[in-house]
Image (cartoon, rainbow, N blue to C red):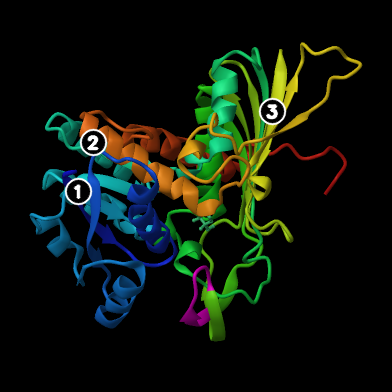
Amino acid sequence: MTPTLGIGLIGYAFMGAAHSHAWRTAPHFFDLPLRPELTVLAGRDSAKVTEAAGKLGWRGTATDWRRVIEREDVDLVDVCTPGNTHAEIAIAALEAGKHVLCEKPLANTVAEAEAMAEAAAKAATRGVRSMVGFTYRRVPAIGLARKLVADGRLGQIRHVRAQYLQDWIADPAAPMSWRLEKDKAGSGALGDIGAHVVDLTQHITGQTLTGVSATLETFVTERPLPTETGKLGGVGGAETGQVTVDDAAVFLGRFTGGALGVFEATRFALGRKNGIRIEINGSAGSLAFDFEDMNVLQFFDGSEPAETAGFRRIIVTEPEHPYVGAWWPAGHGLGYEHGFTHQVVDLVTAIAAGEDPTPSFADGLQVQRVLDAVERSAADSSRWTPIRGEN
Ligand code: SOE
């Protein structure tokens, strides 16, 4: 009999649903060393959490996360709440000896992320593991991109171009949500989606950012308050609230290996739904990825004869590709939810092996420091050089 791993999930909205799906599905497709049990789902509203638990497959419910971390049948706490509660819940869970999976960005401030990384390092000495949910690392095409770079197929990396483009608040009538409030989310497009491309580009290249030059913008500062909440946003009413985060972040970055980075994160790219676009140019080759075509990785091999050289579309649906063999027959493709499933597979595997999974809380802290540098750079208007003769 495979030993079990009792899961307590805090939060049942969009991310809570995605994580529930992953915990439920992983053992049906992967041979896991521990069998996840969907033990308890927590949320503050008793009626809503009970309804969500029924729908998402959880055995029990709680209206206070503290009750979850006290339970002996909970081995791992999965934090899917807004960022302002990550530090308190994750640190308490680690101190109670529970493994922790925490949604991204790790925290709302560097100070919180530092405390979390410290708690994680201390817990690791007692065999308690932690991971931050940069789930896109587990998209097979991203895994392949990282492998091509590690195998030297791109040579020395010169350029990193990364965009995370959404449009779900491009309409000024789109309602307020916690993702638009600084005290809950920490930052806007920067932390919610920019954090993903910071993590992905560092993960693929194996290099870290050393400095940034940035600007942030909030295009719509007031929005209707929601009368009903939805998966993202909801339905707006007559009353309005203040948007206190950035709508868009644009920044340049320099990487440890000498590469130059250009980054853009926005929820105002009308028509772009979940466009995570990454292009990397090296001395020996280039690669390009777009999450809207997530089963494809484009690769240019600079050693091919000029006459026939060109970007190749690699369809990343073969058993030779990361994670793919566990799913459908070759060629059938994966979707958004599979990254979350791969994330729990890697986490459970690391826990059973007594190893620290990645991305770790220390990795989450490093991304938090990049976000902080972007905000500090954007706040320093003396760095913005006006055009001579204008205004
Ligand atoms: C909303 O912008 C969001 O749900 C992010 O919070 C997620 O991290 C991303 O996967 C999809 O978009």
Marks 3 and 2 close (CB-CB < 8 Å): no
Q: Is residue 68 in view from this perspective?
A: yes
Graded by Cα atoms within 10 Å as few (under 14), some (14 to 19) or many (20 or more), the crowding at tag 3 reads many
Using the numbered discs, state the Cα–Cα distance from disc 1 to disc 2 in whole angstroms. 10 Å
Q: Is residue 105 above or below residue 70?
A: above
Q: Residues within 10 Å of mark 2 (few under 14, many from 20)?
A: many
Residue 69 location (% of width, % of height) = 14, 56
| Residues marked 1 and 2 touching at CB (< 8 Å) | yes
Say left or right for 182 vs 2. Answer: right
At label 1, counting other C-alpha atoms closer than 10 Å, the crowd grade (few under 14, some 14-19, many 20 or more) is many
**Residue on which disc 2 sits:** 351
Q: Is residue 369 left or right of residue 302?
A: left
Disc 1 residue type?
A: Leu
Closer-to-camera residue (183/173) = 173
Q: Secondary structure at mark 3?
A: strand
Q: Residue furthest bottom?
A: 238
For the point 58% across and 35% down, the residue is 318
Some atom of ligand 1 lies within 8 Å of the CB belonging to the residue at label 2: no
Q: Nearer the viewer, residue 195 or 211?
A: 195
The x, y position of residue 211, in whole percent, is: 54, 27
The mark that comes first in sequence, 1 or 3, is 1
The residue lying at 63 percent from left, 42 percent from top is 331
Q: Position of residue 312 (x, y in %)?
A: 76, 29
**Residue picked out by circle 1:** 5
Identify the residue under disc 3.
287
In the foreground, 92 or 2 = 2
Q: Which mark is residue 249?
A: none
- State which region is magenta: 225-233
